[in-house]
Image: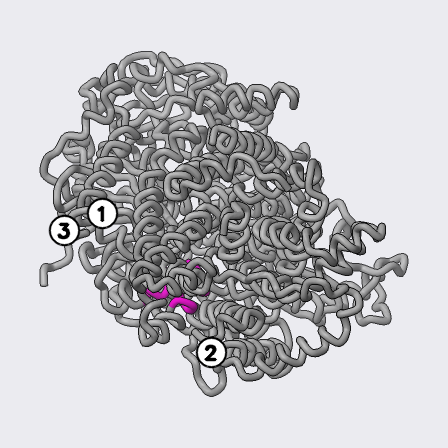
Amino acid sequence: MRLRILALLSVFALLVTACGTGANPTPSPASSGTAPASATPGSAETYPRAETLYTTGKQWGAPSTWNPLDPNAAMGVVGLQYETLFLYDPLKDTFKPWLATSASWTSPTEYTIKVRQGVKWSDGQPLTAADVAFTIGLDKIKAIGANTWDYVTDATATDDSTVVVKFNNPNYQEWATWTYNKPIVPKHIFESKANEDILKFTNVNGVGTGPYLYKTHADDRMVWMKNDNWWAKTALNLDVKPKYIVDIVNGSNSVGLGLLLQGGIDLSNNFLPGIATLVTGGYGITTYYSKPPYMLSANTAWLVTNDKKAPLSDPQFRRAVAYAVNVGDIVNNVYGNIVAAANPTGLLPNWDKYVDKATVDSLGFKYDPAKAKSILAAAGYKTGSDGFVTNKDGSRIALTIMVPSGWSDWEAAEKVIVTSLKAAGINVEAKPVDYNGLVDARNNGNFDFVINNEVQVSNTPWTYYDYIFHMPLQSGAGKNRNYGSYENPQAWALVQQLDKTPVTDIAAMQAITKQLQQIQLTDMPVIPLWYNGMWSQVSNAVWTNWPSAEGTSHYLPSTWNGYWQMGAVLMLTELKPAPQQ
Amino acid sequence: MNDPERISSAVPVGAAAPDRAPIQPAAPAPAPRPGEPAAASGRAEAVGRRREILYFALRDRKVLVGLGILIVFVAAAVVGPLIRPGDPDAFVGPMAAAPSREWWFGTTTFGQDVFAQFVYGVGSTFLVGLFGGGLAALIGMTVGFVAGYRGGVVDEILNMLTNVVLVIPTLALLLIAAAYLTARGVLVEAVFIGLTSWPWAARAIRAQTFSLNTREFVDLARLTGVPSWRVIFGEIAPNMGSYLFMTFILLFGGAILIAATLDFIGLGPTSGSSLGMMMYNAVAWSALQLGMWWWFIPPGLGITAIVGALYVMNVGLDEIFNPRLRKM
Amino acid sequence: MRRYFGRKLLIYGLTFFIAATIDWMIPRFMPGNPVQSLLSRSHVAPDAVPALIAYYNNLFGLDRPIWEQYLSFWGALLSGDLGRSVYLTGRPVTDVIMSAVPYTLALLVPAILLSWWAGNSFGAMAARRRWLDNAALPIGYILTATPYMWLAIVLAWILGFIFRLFPISGGYSYALEPTLTWTFVGSLFSHWFLPFASLFLVMFGGWAIGMRNMIIYELDADYSRYLEALGAPTRLVRKYAFRNAVLPQITGLALQLGVIVSGALVTEIVFSYPGIGKLTLAAIQNEDYFLLQGIFLFIIVGVLIANFLVDIAYVLVDPRTRVGMSGRSA
């Protein structure tokens, strides 16, 4: 029996090995025909624990594309393998020259980029200005989903190290986000793919400039290996410490937590309820802050109101709702203080300088059910026989709130909202629906309230306001902003004006955001609730000196999309191996 | 033993419980003695048999144990919500508390009362079993009776239908059906389960109907021009009452297990709680890794106890209805 | 016999046709819209949205008339193309499924065969010895009434979490690359064991009870009594009884395949075992109906093939079917 099991097992092993290699086509032309045979028996390649960083939290499905232009590219493709012109550090609000040594507006409509010299692609070719100009040019391809060429008119490499980008009526803010979000790709590889089907190019084991090289992947993991020839070693005296990075695909949050507790994962970027008890529980797990809210803030959770549907189309009604929601209960009871209540403007802490304190003091809201009731009464909403307010014409109000079923923390928050709104006389019920149904209802305006948190940390509050005030309204499958369908041409003009303000002109930006906040807090197009955390739990068993408020490393501890180039890559240079016991 | 149909379908189908286990054959109930007109024999005999069955049932350990467990759970489902009124998913307690005098079954990571969820879940478990199993029994009986009684082309078509539904993996079908609905309740789930889990019952009942078809009392009824449905429900069905009852019990248990499976892959009710969803949430929110056994042990234990009790009762009933088995 | 198989093949063919048609409807008639859900997860510039919608509609073939989509679905199906996964950004579904299949088969095939063999042997033994019967019966009932995932959870908790004997997630160690070495095979084995064991145990209980009860029936049948009356040795009678009792167990296996498969799916989910089950969960959670469609079809084909194998086994074991099955007059 033993033998038979062993025999079966080896067949199984063979199959897995064969499929494993089958899934990683080597660039050799004959790979398709020889894939199963190429499973070479040899010593098991093991990643030594002390040199390997295990992460989880970004990847929710099998890694399937390594094309840096695809927003669904595997964990680390942008940031570890492909790099951007600049890094943007939200904690310090600074741009750090990366593949560019400098860049400046040489005229109001001309941006000149100095490309770093001495950087080599991993196939040995040098990075030149032509690569950068080519990458900008790629944005003309509609399938990439960019609108750069709405305001860019030309991008030319004038010599090996200089790119001149010409604009008509430049969107300065938007362009600044481009410089640290767009990965520069090698022209000599991508040139032949530059057409509408560019996203079909999966680019396994691609050619990048970054500190890591593709090692291997399977459906449940992505493995990176250190690039010993990384340019920043000499140019910036930076060195990433882990030799391997193994990113584990989230089967579920629970798998990640189990491995984290056992020291099998070093960095978990999952939402783990009850993490507060683990931080203090002697598991060797730490977070950015050692006390509430434990995490940095990543985005703002709003209560999105359907501003096209009575009674929520009435700004006074929305204001009453804002006063009625007991955010404190959500923060304390639902999240156990791992999130923080949002500022009434909803602007993330790193945008604090754009919050106009005077406006917030005069117009801002806070939890106050009595005030909510008085706003409703003042606006002419009478209380019906069932204790709930009625429409102005006396008809009954029955609102619903939706969150995707199974999102337990949001479901819990939803319950708090329902309870507190009812207490203020607003009749609302939770409506159970799955994610797909929610998207459909939300995009087509068939909802009253939904919770949404889609604007992430960035260098500019423009991304935040563009999301809230975007016009013209979209609908259907393509709707991805302003779900409440709030229409205010004046606000939208301000947002566009903000976009066209140079990023260095903070005072001008503040002047605009002040006006936007006045509109926002008067009309309440969305109701900011709490700041969702940049979930990050780290184990100190193998690696130490993780980013923390108290320590010396102050970088974003996140492997999520877009966070490597917001400084997280520098976290890797600060890590230290844990002392051997 | 030379009737191929008995081998190929009657016994094995009875042998295959709705969910998965070849739980045992329920042989046809003894038909009225040959020569005795069925209608005339009816009442007195039925009463006598009923008494006899009751007599043995009250002395059969398996039936008593099974019934006892079921009663305990039904009581829990009825009384429980009275002890812990309100929404079972409400956030009422401390987070992740172990069982204590105050929180009998502890609380979840979010501070929900596991006991409240449990008793509520037991209730919906019975609901799913009752409606899902009931609907499946209804469809199975209708298809089985009609196919078995009418035979010919009707039988061919129904048989084909049965076979098709039989080989389609139920879960895959349910998966899609459930995904179609963005909002689902326990009853909807039960209907889906009922609609897909009847084929084995239909096959078994069809085979039984065949064997009764040739009995004199059925022939007699048919000859006197009684309409088909009256022959079926007046003559055939009563004569396999015990068989039908046992079929229902197995379908009941099967529906519960299927519901638990559906719940566990996240296709359970979008509102309300169930034992399967408790397990789903416990696993999804790391109860295993955090050692919160009180979150995942009760729901699984509940399902096992209820389904196990049903099965054991079924075997006990089998022994009662088939006296020859009693000696073992 | 030809008619018997002909009939079976007709049923399987019809089932496949119906199932495939339902299957085709999945991504097209689901509430919502797969492209909409896909776009809702990435925040592209609003101006670029129409282009992306067109791109994805074209990629998934949703921009053609319905009837044409249906026909090309069959065309693609017959050439083994199950379309493209939405949440895995256009990766071919066949490809995705194939990399998960070895894991699922490695769980299912040994679990089914071993539990069937062990359960039947044990059941037959239990029917012979009263003490064994008294002990085996309750255990069998408890096992068979246990939901697959719960047994898996309990095993993972006790053997994986408390005693740390086995890993409780993944297909092999995250520190290894698939190579044909003992380290790797060992890792594969230790990850495989718990999911296998939980599947095995639940099924084992069912088969054991089935066999035990079946033997008792057979021993009570006329032919057994006749043999006994003739003075045949008990061993011989039991041998015949066993043979007859095995037949329904084979049919039972066929009937249970669908349920066993779903049991394997939830077991994989508990252990994050990288097979079809985990893929199914991911497809559901990400509302990837194209992937779900492929998985569904794959499971159906698998179950149909397995059913057919059981049919063949049945004919081999039971010579009567070669005559009897060919035509039944009712």
Residue corresponding to mark 3? A50
Residue corresponding to mark 1? C188
User: Which residue is found at the position 30% from the left and 33% from the top?
Assistant: A97
Check if residue C148 falls in the magenta segment: yes
Measured along the vertical axis of the image, is residue A96 above or below residue B266?
above
Query: Is label 1 in a helix, a strand or a loop?
Result: helix
Q: Residue furthest front?
A: C230
User: Which residue is found at the position 77% from the left and 52% from the top?
Assistant: A314
Q: Which residue range is magenta in the image?
A: C140-157
The picture places residue A288, in percent across and down from the top left corner, at: 33, 58
* Residue A410 located left or right of residue A33: right
Q: CA distance from mark 2 to mark 1?
A: 37 Å
Residue type, numbered disc 3 = Ala
* Crowd band around label 1 with a 10 angstrom C-alpha radius: few (<14), some (14–19), many (20+): many
The mark closer to the camera, 3 or 1, is 1
Query: Is label 3 in a helix, a strand or a loop?
Result: helix
Q: Are marks 3 and 2 in contact (CB under 8 Å)?
A: no
User: Which residue is found at the position 26% from the left and 18% from the top?
Assistant: A33
Classify residue B287 by image quadrant: bottom left
Same chain for the residues at labels 3 and 1, yes or no? Answer: no
